[in-house]
Amino acid sequence: MNSLALFDTSPKALVKFVPPPFGGLVRTALDHVRHGRFQRSLSLMVAATSAVSALEVGYEHYRGSYSNPVMYTPVVLSGALAVASFAAVFSRRAAQTWMRWLSWITLLDGVVGFGFHIRGIRRKPGGWRMPVTNLVMGPPLFAPLLFGTSAYLGVLASYLQREEDSETGSYVLDALAVGRELTGRDDWRNDIRVGRFQKHFCIVVAAYTVCVGAESWYSHYKNNFAYRVQWSPILLTPLLSGAALGSLKSERVANTLLPAASALAMVDGVVGTYFHVRGILRKPGGRTKPLYNTLYGPPIFAPMLFAAAGMLGMMAYLVRRERSR
Amino acid sequence: MNWPHSKSPLGGAFEEPEHDGMHRLGPMQRISIPRRRFRDEDVVDYVIVGVGSAGGVLLQRLARAGFDVVGFEAGPFWDTERDWVSDEAGSHNLYWNDLRIIGGKDPLALGSNNSGKGVGGGSVHWAAFTPRFHPSDFEVYTRDGVGADWPIDYEDIEPYYELLEQEMPVAGPAWYPWGKPHGHPYAPHPMGAVGDALITGCTRLGIGVSAGGPVAILSASRGDRPHCIYRGFCIQACKVGAKASTLITHVPDALKHGAEIRDTSMVSRIEIGKDGRATGVHYFDAEGREHFQRARCVIVSGYAIETPRLLLNSACPGHERGLANSSGTLGKYLMAQAGNVILGRFEELIRMYKAPPAHALTEEFYETDPTRDFARGFAIQTVGPLPIAFAKQMMAAKGQWGWGLRRSMMDYNHWAAFGLLGEILPWADNTVELATGANEKDRFGLPVARVSFNLHENDKRLIEFGKNKTMDVMRAAGAVEVVQEQRFAHLVGAARMGKSPHDSVCDKFGRTWDVDNLFVMDGSVMPTQGSANPGLTIQSLAARTADYLISNHSAIQSGAKRSLEEPGIRKTLSPPGTFRSGIPHLR
């Protein structure tokens, strides 16, 4: 406990302030997260985010008319991943097989898509010589990487322990872990299994935030930042990614700035969603053209992507740091 | 780099296209144009006169099926990077600007955006609106007692609509409610401010409206064609390669399969042999020398004015009134659509040039409505006149001149324009004839066309009603000042198809009743025209006729009795890449 700190803001210390009716519940949940025993709940989250990803990539690629058959792959994959991760909520085996491999494939698909999006911008008139125009008009550059987020979480979830493992007190239930116990190897997968991946996760949070911030910058640039509130995600981006990077060095930052910035990002995402829905309803035709205006109005799920950055940051705040090796 | 005084553009200059001997169609597509393949004395399977909307599709289909085809085109073979400019005045060479005589009580303005000259024809400078005809269009006479019935039904042409929508491809909403509801293979386009105004106006009046299509402009790239970048120069020929024209969709594939296009070759006369069958065509080359190309079958695809003109100019013993004119209907029943432009001034900026002219429409008033005092109906569409067109419209609409006109033109960015597209019925006194004056000849000494046009009572009522309705929509959208100019669009008819040889020029596949190896296939075969832009229907009819020609090839070549069954659609003849992309949609 650092004497310079006003008070301890680590999750462990803060959980004491939760009022009685919820206290026990929250303490249990935190204990699960900190020891990597939340495979079921994370799988449920992966199922939800994959379903949203499938919907979003479905309509964004519809906007691109599926002019290249490869554009179907993310729709199909994230749909499949949503099903697999929902199954993983109920089945350990599904989590360690279907969800794990579909997550890896989907993640790879996101990287491949990133390449296709770079190519798409290059092929536009003027290519990379008119970066701003073609970023705004062309395929969204970082979208495929952002799309990979739920897959990344799926990979993560597949290596966790399940909630009920806390009762058994044993964590040798993963075939991988059994192998490790026998060979004595101890790698990153084991860190994830026991909930010690804060630094690794902070890198992801920082990268994700930069991508989502860039997306929001050039998308908002499209309409000249007509509303001042459109600057909020752009201003929060360096704050959150800075906090995440700072957390690599200092546990103090991870316990103070990181949760604060994450909370702001989550609030900003909710506010943004309200504005985006309002923007869709304000378009010509309003609610008489729901599909068309959702297609070409402000992207309805985009602010949620920013809120997801906050949520990931919050998760990074909750898990434990890697052991020093 | 001594910026900001540097002369070179920021980021460096764009390279000149290198001279590689290739012919460019848009920024990414290159083709090599084969030299002459057939000699005049070769008897080719098919000669197609006019490589435009219909001619391009026919050429591609017949070449793919393995026939020897020559397409004659009076205009040039465009190299889009060298020959086209994104400039209103500079694009006038796309039109058929030769002498034509106009007459009648309501003469049509010709020599502008209503007929093309050059490979691709009118599809080079159409706005690319591609609505389908409605089922009711094929039986206007049966339903309303006016106009004429088609010899075919909507069901006969529907599969070809679907196929051509894939081939162009057409962008539009996933659910298009009018006529027979259907979807589109490419997603709708984002709206420009004119489309926004149309949607706002229609929504406030409770009128259904289609956003973002149907229009044959890519909303996403396809193969070597980039998607639309919303510069608004569709009617000046799309240098981007996003707007479909047969020049870039079908002609490259036709050349690849061995078709020949003989450009700057003006066909002057179709030769009829002793047995009453066509034996070939006489044509003038670029230097004005006359040649004769032998052929087993001739297809005329020269559009509603040049097709009847060529057939009339081909009069010969046995066909004194003009070729294929035993019924006397050749050159009659010419139609144009009412194309009034309604302009509205808005307080906020509109900037009509941003977005393709064609990107939203409503067909709510398409069908006959018994509560109105006229038959048939109209559509309301976005149009995006550029400054010169806008100046002409303001001159016509407000009678402005001089300083007043300049004031209006400075205001250009505040105006939006809607186009009425009203169905004008076929009347026998709207005709294409040969001009008889001594000076009324073209540079080859051929008599030019004389086009007479008169509006009738039903047409005038329809225009009046449609004009007022469009103005209402414009006001509902928030325009503070609304004016209008009367004009016409889309010439079709004058060599109509029909069920009997007594009241039509050709049968339902375009074969002329009088000469059994002479076909007509273009906009001129339409008995009625609906209030839909005819481009998609012209190309669909051409694809259907191509299937028919392939099915009945030997009978047509020999003059034997042929079957009049529907040929059945061939999906193997589409250009490459047709079925690889696009949204699988519900019919």
Image (tube, coloured by chain):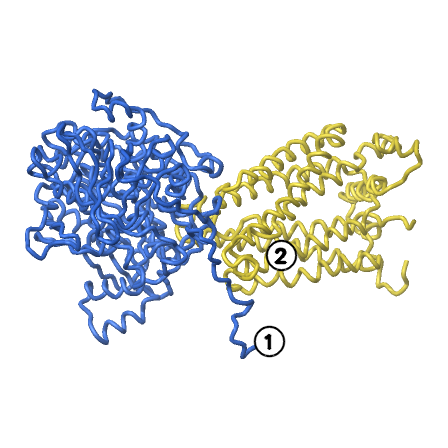
Q: Look at mark 2 in the image and give the residue it sits on.
A: A268
Residue B411 lies, with reference to residue B517, above or below; the image says: below
Q: Which chain is yellow?
A: A
Spot occupied by residue B394 in the image (x, y as percentages of width and height):
23, 65
| Residue at 25% over, 22% down | B555
Chain bearing tag 2 is A
Find residue B1 and name its label: 1
Considering the numbered disc 2 on the image, is that residue within a helix, a strand or a loop?
helix
Instruction: Please name whichever residue, B506 or B20, is drawn nearer the observer in this view of the structure.
Output: B20
Instruction: Please name whichever residue, B562 or A203, is drawn nearer the observer in this view of the structure.
Output: B562
Query: Around disc 2, counting alpha carbons within 10 Å, would you say few (fewer than 14), some (14 to 19), or many (20 or more)?
Result: many
Instruction: Evaluate whether label 1 is on the same chain as label 2.
Output: no
Q: Is residue B326 left or right of residue B14?
A: left
- Quadrant location of the C terminus of chain B? top left
Residue A129 lies, with reference to residue B329, above or below; the image says: below
Q: Which chain is blue?
A: B
Q: Is residue B536 left or right of residue B269?
A: right
Tell me which corner region of the image, top left, top right, bottom left or bottom right, holds residue B575.
top left
The three-letter amino acid code for the residue at tag 2 is Asp
Chain bearing tag 1 is B
Find residue A284 and name its label: none
Q: CA distance from mark 1 to mark 2?
A: 43 Å
Tell me which corner region of the image, top left, top right, bottom left or bottom right, holds residue B441.
bottom left
| Residue at 74% over, 51% down | A204
Residue B402 lies, with reference to residue A169, above or below; the image says: below
Spot occupied by residue B106 in the image (x, y as percentages of width and height):
11, 53
* Dot in front, 1 or 2: 1
The three-letter amino acid code for the residue at tag 1 is Met
- Whether pointer 1 and pointer 2 mark residues with C-beta atoms closer than 8 Å, the reply is no
Tell me which corner region of the image, top left, top right, bottom left or bottom right, holds residue B563.
top left
